[in-house]
Image: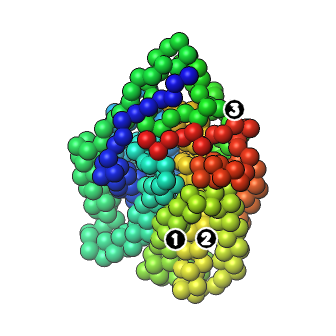
Amino acid sequence: MSKPTVKNSSTAYEWKVVLLMAMGFGLVGLDRWIITPMFPVMMGDLHLDYQDLGNIIAVLGLSWGVFSIVMGSLSDKFGRRKVLIPSIILFSLLSILTGLAGGLASLLLIRAVMGVTEGSFSPASVAVTAEVSKEKRRGFNMGLQQSTFALFGLGFGPIIATQLLRFVPSWHWVFAIVAVPGFIVGFFIYKVVREPQVSTVNSGSSAVAAPKLTASPAAAQPGGKPRFIEIFRHRNILLCMFALCGAMTCIFVLGSMFPSYLTDYLKLSVTQMGFITSAIGFGAFFGQLAIPGLSDRFGRKTVTLCAMLLTLVMLGILIGTGASPMALFALLFMTAFGCNGCLPLLSGTITIESVPAPLISTAAGVIIGVGEIFGGGVAPSLAGFIAKNYGIENTLLLAIGGIVVCLLLCLFLKETAPSRIRAGREPQASGHPQSAAIEAG
């Protein structure tokens, strides 16, 4: 059987695309999370409570999850550009509409539709990044692309929100201002990003179109493209799916509830809250740069386990820390560094190294989708219920539970890093040389 071949993309094109995908994903994070640091201000105007906050976060996560699954598959079938460009334009428009919302019902509707567009952008952007990346820096590129979600949304977002509130007439204007960059990035995606270059090769008795990443021998299906159900034959997919649910439970509980925890439970000011909460974004940004890059050298499984252990320890200390802004910032930074740093591995790198190349966006969509439905949908709503009925401080116990689940599941991951597979340091997933066959392109 002939091995699929492709035309090589230039390094310059690789970096342009990775940076555009990073900018786009960063704006997804900004438009999604800008609402949480402004919620203490919005509560009075719109007569909202903690349960409403949890539900607003949850409805976006649920629709994001469903459409990540749907649109991931469609982008494999119809192309990346047809998903990426409309989705970034639409979620920018919906950010503007968020600022026009007059109550809970309109907010829920607008944020649900925003989840559709952002859920569509997510798996397609992950697939594009994987397709243009050389093997030796695939982990780093996937981390870079996803790191901006937290940097923009949870790092710069609280600072932008709390500072803009000092200069604009009302909170409504903040949503309109942060929407503008999305239109600019959408234009550059239209001008720069091409569909993956393919060549036709013979596989068995039929011709198969090969994307930039080639399928591993274990994943390849002679005689045609692999079916959707094939992604579940690989042990790592199920493990990553449920481990991501645990990690995202921690991330979304902290992202949605921690700002109000700081102002309402620890009695810190809004400005102090903005400074401390930004640690989530900055910690996640550096974690998503460092941890996936380290996994290129030391292995996906080893690095993921170490990062989850770090997260568990830091979060445990954080829960017992009082109203000390610098200590809270440092502990929150390290918690996000470990937890968010693993997201590109669980939802991106390990995933695309475990399935046939024609299904990488489908697999990423399924894992991101399920993680979003539970971590981004169910968990914030549950956290809102806990905060309203048992005290907002107890929502942090839910975050701890998510990390414990993620850590336990990651113990059973099979290594996929090409460097580790070639070195023969760990048995290949499912008894096959999975990632060693993934080409640099």
Q: Quadrant of the N terminus?
A: top right
In the picture shown, does residue 128 fall above or below 44?
above
Amino acid found under the numbered disc labelled 3: Arg
Amino acid found under the numbered disc labelled 2: Thr
Q: Which residue is mark 3?
A: 233
Image location (x, y in percent) of residue 394? 70, 68
Kindly indicate the quadrant of the structure image that contains residue 224.
Answer: top right
Question: Label 3 near label 2: C-beta < 8 Å?
Answer: no
Instruction: Indicate which label's residue lies in the foreground, 1 or 3.
Output: 3
Q: Quadrant of the C terminus?
A: top left
Q: Which residue is located at x 50 percent, y 35 percent?
A: 214
Q: Residues within 10 Å of mark 1 (few under 14, many from 20)?
A: many
Q: Earlier in the sequence, mark 2 or mark 1?
A: 1
Amino acid found under the numbered disc labelled 1: Gly
Specify whether residue 197 is in view.
yes
Q: Which residue is located at x 57 percent, y 63 percent?
A: 294
CA gap, disc 1 to disc 3? 34 Å
Image location (x, y in percent) of residue 395? 67, 65
Question: Label 3 near label 1: C-beta < 8 Å?
Answer: no
Q: Which residue is mark 2?
A: 335
Q: Which residue is located at x 36 percent, y 35 percent?
A: 7
